[in-house]
Structure formats: C-alpha cells, structure tokens
Amino acid sequence: MTKRDWVMKSTVAVMLSTSLLMGGQVGVVAAKTQDSKQSEVANIATSLIGKDYQYKAKGPKQFGSAELATYTYKQVGISIGSTISSLCKTGTKVSEKSVEPGDLVFFASSGSGSPTFMGIYIGGDQFVYSSQGEDEVVLKTYSEYSDKFVGARRILEETDSSETPSKPEPPVSNIADQVIKNGEKYLGTKYKYGSSSSTTNTFDCSSFTQRVFKEAGITLPRDSRQQSTVGKTVSKNDLQKGDLVFMKASVNSSSDRITHVAIYAGNGKILHTYGSPGVTYSKYDGTNWEKRVVKAKRVL
C-alpha cells in the first residue's frame, strides 16, 4: 500500500468514526439525504480524497479546483460549468449557514472579492476541494474557512421532507408565469448583440433570459452556452412553460454549437429576442426555431 493510499483510507476511517460519535450527523452522507443525489455527490467527492491536484485537470486521476465539482456532478448525470467564475453564478444562492451536502462553496484567499478556490460541502461541517497548495484533493473543516467564505450555490434542490421550510417556495408554475410576465414587459425592446447585462434598453438573447429570470429570483450565467450547462436536461417533446431552449446557428448547420436561447412560453410559442423585432413572441412548434434546437433545460 502506498503512502497516499494509506492517508486516504485513514481519512475515511476518521470520518466514519466521527459520524458514529456524533449520532450519524457527520461524514460521507448526512442521514436526511440518504439515497438522494445530494448524498451521491457527497459520496463521490469523498471518494476522490487523495487524488492529485493539477491545474484545469478534469479527472479521474487529477483535478483542478472547479473541475472537481464538474466531474462529481457529471457522475450523477448533471452537467455544470467548468470554471470557478461560471460555477459561482450557477444554481441558487444559499447563505453560509444554510449549506447542505452537495452545495458548492466558494472562498477567496483574501476573504473578499472573486473566489479563488472552491469545494463541495459534504455535511458535518466538512467540505472537499482540490488544493493547489497541498497538491491533492483534501478534506477540510468548513467553519475554519469562514473568514475566506465568499459564497455558496445549490445545484440540487432536494430537501428533507420531514422539515418545514420557514418560507415555502412558490409553485413552479407560478414562477414560470412570473418569468413570462417579466419578459412581456420588455416586448419590442431593441436587440443588440453583446448588450450589457446592466441595461434594459437593449438585449441580446442571453442577456434577456438572464434579466427576466433574475427578476424572478433565479440567477443564470451571462451567455447562452454557459446557461445551457445549468438546470435539468429535458426532452424537446416534454417542454414546460419557463424551460430554456438552446439553438444552433441554422437548421442545416453541421455544428451543434449553441448560438441562441429562448424561453418556452407554452402553447407552442417561445419568448426571445433577435434581429429587427427585438423582444418578441415567435411560433415554435413545427418551425425552423424548433428544428434548430440542440438541447432544452429546466431551471425552475
């Protein structure tokens, strides 16, 4: 047995012992998320302790900081971004004290500003991250990094059914209706490629979707290709109001490179912006818009 193998096995043994001493509240899987994707993510992240760190390495033997999260979520069938800057905008924002297993946690060496490293919270005041300084994937105590904490994001929305949320979330259909309502107030707004995300005087396709979802309390990355990495992939035949549809350049394009994003508005229509009409509704079913679709994602 190599020294690295011995260290990893010892680490896991200590975690399991701690879990027993504290009534099963600490360790690889928190009891309330057993058999869920949250616990799967925590288990997979923990299994990678001791793997080598390498800048931008995507696994399975070596990992960069963000790529550890990308790889882990991929193992449970969820595609997310592959950079810290994109992942810190992915999913739903959660507070430092409200993190759950599977949440992404972000830190800055200076304690403020943009994150410089990140990890996966696994429960029991522990998180796993690929450390450049220690040259491997390591297990750390979450509370000890409080002075460096700059944010947390939730990709998975599973919660313990035995707990009553302090503020119930509105039904998805209500949020979808709100997204559409937000978009409708911008009907006719001019299209401008590369429009700033800070303005509502003009939009391009992805700044429009980012804006109307933000106004409904949902954060999306800035461009269409980044937006296509978040949420749950859904069949093009199973679209619901509020789903995002991502399209290639043309029906006959040989490349599936995403160049456009629209919001499915129900009743065979999409709400989006392009060209001379600006923000507009377009017929979707049976049109070239539908034929151009590369993927569809559900973020609600």
Image: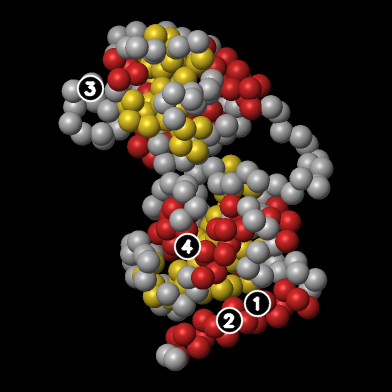
Q: CA distance from mark 2 to mark 3?
A: 52 Å
Q: Are marks 4 and 1 in contact (CB under 8 Å)?
A: no
Q: Which amino acid type corresponds to the residue marked 2 in the rendered image?
A: Thr
Label 3 CA crowd tier, 10 Å (few <14, some 14–19, many 20+): some
Q: Are marks 2 and 4 in contact (CB under 8 Å)?
A: no
Q: Which amino acid type corresponds to the residue marked 4 in the rendered image?
A: Phe
Q: Relative to the observer, which residue lies in front, 261 or 86?
A: 261
Label 1 element class: helix
Q: Which amino acid type corresponds to the residue marked 3 in the rendered image?
A: Ser
Q: CA distance from mark 4 to mark 3?
A: 38 Å
At horizontal 50% and vertical 10% (from top left) the residue drawn is 267
Q: Which of the 4 image quarters holds residue 253?
A: top left
**x, y percentage for residue 54?**
34, 70
Label 1 CA crowd tier, 10 Å (few <14, some 14–19, many 20+): some
Q: Relative to the observer, which residue lies in front, 245 or 87?
A: 245
Residue 117's disc is 4
Label 4 element class: strand
70 left or right of 277? right
- Earlier sequence position, callout 4 versus callout 3: 4
Q: Would you say residue 120 is visible in this rendering? A: yes
Q: CA distance from mark 4 to mark 1?
A: 23 Å
Q: Which amino acid type corresponds to the residue marked 1 in the rendered image?
A: Met
Per the image, the residue denoted by label 1 is 15
Per the image, the residue denoted by label 2 is 11
Residue 250's disc is 3
